[in-house]
Amino acid sequence: MYHGWVKNLDEVLYVYMKSPKSYTGEDVVEISCHGGVAIAKAILDRAIVAGARQAHPGEFTKRAFLNGRMDLIQAEAVLEAISARTIRVAEVAAGHLGGRLSKEIEAVRATLMDVLAAIETGIDFPEEEDRGRVGKAGGLLRRQLRIVERAIDGAGYGEILKEGARVVIAGKPNVGKSSLLNRLLQEERALVTERPGTTRDTIEEPLGINGIPIRLIDTAGIRRSRDKVELLGINRAKASIEKADLVIALYDASCGRLEKEDHELQGLVKGRKVIVALNKSDLGVRLKSKGSHISAKTGRGVDKLLGLMAGELLRGMKTGGQTILSSRQLGCLVKAKQSLQCAEKSIRIKAGSELIALDIREAIQALGEMTGIEVSEEVIERIFADFCVGK
């Protein structure tokens, strides 16, 4: 590290990172100035005048990949870390950048290459073909298939972590939807009045629950209306329910029975992931219905509701193994799974070794595409085009 000046501009530190241990694997010089857009731009302009050029989007990470400093899974993890909206996504990205997923996939690929070599020995030297060896290969294939399937199972969890979940608060007018939104956000985001029908449009706000990014959506009250503006809001509310990953169906616990608007809501949420919340429990519970009793006004039961929301969003998802954040990687895993299933079936029905070898070879290629060992220039360009300049 050197201390010096960019003449007539700023006092700076120059850091020289020598190849091959720099980020890109090349000689790199980094200049740290005092900040401020004007100074940084002036220093950049002088570098360009001296013969440098601005980097293309993702160029530093692309060079790191091309120079063997990281594989394609790790390169994509850089983008995942940059765009992470919660600490949990950042932690998953850090694990991928550290090579956890890459090592597991490469271990599967290496095993499949050994199996392929054993199968091809019987093809090249028919007199030495050993059905016992093929049977052993079948056991190895099944174990690798299970590893690939576990990784695919983690893709649903990864999508929720990366893209976030749409959680819609729905119910009849004046049931406390906006009050619940404000309570969950811990700020007065939505206007709350005693007059039913205050909310005429959807209100969307971000929220994080147990590391899961959520788009929390308050909607207009579900009821029959002749008011054109309110009717637009009600239609938007119904459209939001259709697109929701989870619906909080809100009912008035202080009412003695369900009203026609409540029955309409029950029809709208049928077949969807839904949590029934009985609001206004601070006024007494008269409604005999199953659900989580809460008070948006006092906060009673809201912490429990948050836990229920996280649990319902993750219900049925595998969260213990590798978490896949990239749709490209998921596509590669699905191709590998299909090929391995075909190879395993061919072994089971005692098909020819040539067919078995073909399917194993396709699985190896799919996993190679995932790590970047076998990948086209077009795919590489598409991946790094999503990066920002300077990464």
Image: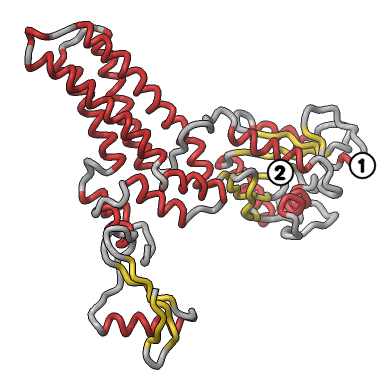
Position of residue 343 measured from the top left corner of the image (x, y, whole percent): 25, 18
Q: Earlier in the sequence, mark 2 or mark 1?
A: 2
Residue 199's place in the image compared with 347, above or below, is below
Position of residue 150 measured from the top left corner of the image (x, y, whole percent): 44, 27
**Residue at x-position 33% and y-position 57%:** 61
Report the number of numbered marks.
2
Quadrant occupied by the C terminus: bottom left
Q: Secondary structure at mark 2?
A: loop
Of the residues shown, which amino acid type is indicated by label 1?
Answer: Leu
Residue with the mark numbered 2: 222
Q: Secondary structure at mark 1?
A: helix
Q: Residues within 10 Å of mark 1 (few under 14, many from 20)?
A: few
> Distance from label 2 to label 1 (Cα)?
22 Å
Mark nearer the viewer, 2 or 1:
1
Of the residues shown, which amino acid type is indicated by label 2?
Answer: Ile
Which mark, residue 283?
1
Q: Quadrant of residue 369?
A: top left
The colour style of the image is secondary structure
**In contact (CB < 8 Å): disc 2 and disc 1:** no
Which mark, residue 341?
none
- Left or right of 50, for residue 80: right
Position of residue 35 measured from the top left corner of the image (x, y, whole percent): 48, 79
